[in-house]
Image (tube, rainbow, N blue to C red):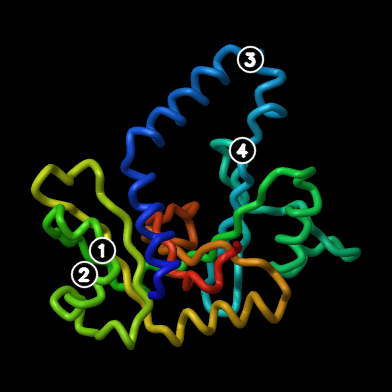
């Protein structure tokens, strides 16, 4: 990690846990409450979340607007059949009318190794370096073999311990996913982990980390 990336990461981690972020969230919520409901969506547009899940060769596209998550079925070809996944994603983007669209690819939960780990609070200043250095204590891989992602478990962390949800996947899998999106010229925002046990019958839910390398993320 170079100096600029470290600075960006440190600022991001600081903001996520800062009182400023909490205040901004509270302020926006309070401000929104004074706006009539019929104008809230226009003045405070939420991002449209697109989730892609894969089972073998089949890729399903899920779309979440507000709190409603459902399988996307609005893009069909002339024969009335569902379009390929990349056409579905583009269809959502084209209909977004200026709203931000976030595209996440969800790995099956058996494709990633997920661990709950704890570190001293002092490690918060250099989390990625600490995790990378001690990675072999948590998983049977080295930092050179895998792509890692993590999020702070704020509910269980305290003034002494910092609890994290850590996920790792082989770098080859990351490359495979990136290439799949590049081939279809679809911009990818994140690679996450699907927590749903029965992906065939249940809607996806995700861990909330990003396994997409920083140099591949949108600026």
Q: Earlier in the sequence, mark 2 or mark 4?
A: 4
Q: Residue at x 43, y 59 (%)?
A: 8
- Whether residue 71 is visible, yes or no, is yes
User: Disc 3 designates what residue?
Assistant: 35
Q: Quadrant of the N terminus?
A: bottom left
Give the mark, 1 or 3, whose residue is nearer the N terminus.
3
The residue positioned farthest toward the front in the image shown:
3
Sequence-first disc among 3 and 4: 3
* Mark 4 residue element: loop
Secondary structure at numbered mark 2: helix
Discs 1/3, front: 1
Q: Position of residue 51 (x, y in %)?
A: 56, 58
* Location of mark 2 (residue): 130
Q: Nearer the viewer, residue 138 or 195?
A: 138
The quarter of the rendered structure image containing the C terminus is bottom right
* Residue bearing mark 1: 126
Q: Quadrant of residue 79?
A: bottom right
Q: CA distance from mark 2 to mark 1?
A: 6 Å
Name which quarter of the figure residue 37 lies in.
top right
Q: CA distance from mark 3 to mark 2?
A: 45 Å
Query: Marks 3 and 4, how far apart in space?
Result: 15 Å
Q: Nearer the viewer, mark 2 or mark 4?
A: 2
Checking the image for residue 46, the label placed there is 4
**Taking the image as drawn, is residue 196 in sight?**
no
Q: Does dot 1 land on a helix, a strand or a loop?
A: helix
């Amino acid at each position: 990690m170079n100096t600029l990336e470290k600075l960006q990461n440190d600022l991001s981690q600081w903001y996520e846990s800062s009182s400023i972020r909490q205040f901004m969230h509270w302020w926006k919520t309070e401000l929104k409450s004074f706006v009539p409901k019929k104008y809230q969506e226009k003045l405070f547009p939420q991002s449209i979340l697109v989730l892609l899940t894969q089972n073998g060769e089949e890729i399903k596209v899920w779309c979440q607007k507000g709190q409603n998550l459902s399988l996307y079925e609005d893009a069909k070809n002339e024969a009335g059949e569902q379009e390929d996944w990349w056409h579905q994603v583009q269809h959502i983007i084209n209909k977004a009318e200026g709203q931000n669209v976030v595209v996440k690819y969800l790995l099956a939960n058996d494709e990633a190794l997920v661990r709950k780990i704890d570190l001293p609070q002092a490690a918060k200043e250099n989390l990625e370096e600490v995790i990378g250095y001690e990675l072999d204590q948590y998983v049977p891989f080295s930092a050179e073999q895998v792509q890692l992602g993590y999020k702070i478990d704020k509910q269980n962390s305290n003034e002494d311990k910092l609890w994290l949800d850590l996920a790792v996947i082989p770098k080859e899998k990351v490359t495979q996913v990136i290439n799949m999106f590049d081939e279809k010229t679809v911009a990818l925002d994140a690679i996450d982990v699907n927590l749903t046990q029965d992906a065939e019958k249940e809607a996806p839910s995700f861990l909330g980390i990003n396994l997409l390398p920083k140099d591949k993320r949108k600026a």
